[in-house]
Image (tube, rainbow, N blue to C red):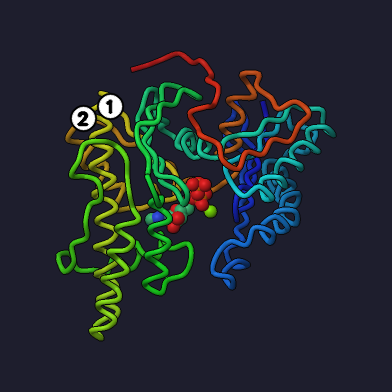
Amino acid sequence: MLVLGIETSCDETGVALFDTEQGLLAHALYSQIDMHADYGGVVPELASRDHVRKLLPLCDQVLAAAGRTRRDIEGIAYTAGPGLVGALMVGGAVAHALGLALDVPVLGVHHMEGHLLAPMLEERPPAFPFVALLVSGGHTQLVRVDGIGQYQMLGESVDDAAGEAFDKTAKMLGLDYPGGPRVAALAEKGRAGRYRFPRPMTDRPGLDFSFSGLKTYTLNTVNEASAAGTLDEQTRADIALAFESAVVDTLVIKCRRALEATGCKRLVMAGGVSANKRLRAALEGMAEKLAATVFYARPEFCTDNGAMIAYAGAQRLLAGQRDGNRIVTVPRWPMDTLPPIHQPRST
Ligand code: ATP
Ligand code: FE
Ligand code: MG
């Protein structure tokens, strides 16, 4: 089944073609980051309008890249939520219009399920069951995954998401959005040991996270250095490293607990922050001691993209799930309410 995937939940227009027999055929992404930069954040109405401009040209671009035409499409998947409602509406409207015109089934997909399944697009995909660490701009969650749609929430952030903490820290250090990669690059020049930031909620049992206190700690450190006249490039790098180390350590501690609690030997990391090199290395080091394996997607499939939506949608379309004649947008949508697809279980 040849599935067109459409992602428009926020400020990135992503399109991909996934074939359930041949795999990923083509994908393209247009980022609106430059357009929103002047406003210091994503402006929802501008985001929707830009998706309108970019979406169909991107669809034609991936079809051409794959050597296919619209007539070859056998199913369409789009992000139905969570996300900005106007932006979601554009993807949903285009998906349903194309579906009607081509007479093919259409399905709204959960954005975080897309992130979660993105590592399945890689050469060595994880088998079920596994523990998933979802770390993105809006989510920090630990999930036990027994199959597609079989999700048990083990823990999540009670306040800011990990990616959000990276973005806010970037702002404090005078870096642009998205802050994650920029903080990580600055941290490369940092000296370990000058600052030590707290590891929130690691001193008590449980698998929940909190990152807002860490953000305040960073702000106070920046302000103190600024007042003392010592906020030079080296100090900023030292702060970036201290912040990144605190986030990484915290995530590693909780992932280890989740692996021990579930007895799972596979850990999947997904979402934008899973592109972080220090986090990848630290999780791999921890997993090695537990004889567990870590799985993740290539960096461009960690952040928002159409390929993950095409993949997740293809699995569900193949299982017979579809929308009916209704555009679905769900701005807030808990992932553990999704229906399962039953698959053979391996250990
Ligand atoms: P959600 O998926 O929760 O709706 P989102 O779609 O905005 O939110 P993603 O696109 O998955 O989030 O990821 C973007 C986030 O990932 C940003 O917060 C960004 O700073 C962060 N990020 C990207 N690369 C890195 C990196 N190398 N290190 C740390 N953070 C990173
Ligand atoms: Fe995302
Ligand atoms: Mg994004």
Examine the rendering and report whether any part of residue 160 can be seen.
yes
Q: How many marks?
A: 2
Question: Is the shortest distance between ligand 1 and the CB of mark 2 under 8 Å?
Answer: no
Name the residue: 73% across, 36% down. 327
In the displayed structure image, the side of residue 279 where residue 32 appears, left or right: right
Q: Counting other residues with Cα less than 10 Å from the Cα at mark 1, is it few (<14), some (14-19), or many (20 or more)?
A: some
Circle 1 sits on which residue? 265
Quarter-of-image position of residue 229? bottom left
Label 2 secondary element: loop
* C-alpha separation, residue under disc 1 versus residue under disc 2: 7 Å
Say left or right for 267 vs 50: left
Asked whether, in this view, residue 224 is left or right of residue 211, the answer is left
- Amino acid type at circle 1 is Lys
Residue at image mark 2: 291
State the mark number for residue 297: none
Please name the residue shown 65% across and 45% down the image: 15
Counting from the top left corner in percent of width and height, residue 181 is at 41, 60
How far across and down, in percent of the image, does residue 241 sit?
26, 63
Residue 169 image point, x, y percent: 37, 65
Does 241 sit above or below residue 86?
below
Q: Earlier in the sequence, mark 1 or mark 2?
A: 1
- Find out whether the residues at labels 1 and 2 contact each other: C-beta distance under 8 Å: yes
Q: Is residue 109 above or below residue 234?
A: above
Closest to the observer, 62 or 98: 98
Q: Is residue 201 above or below residue 239?
A: above
Q: Residue at x 76, y 31 (%)?
A: 326
- The residue nearer to you, when weighing 202 against 92, is 202
Picture residue at 35% right of the left edge, 36% below the top: 155
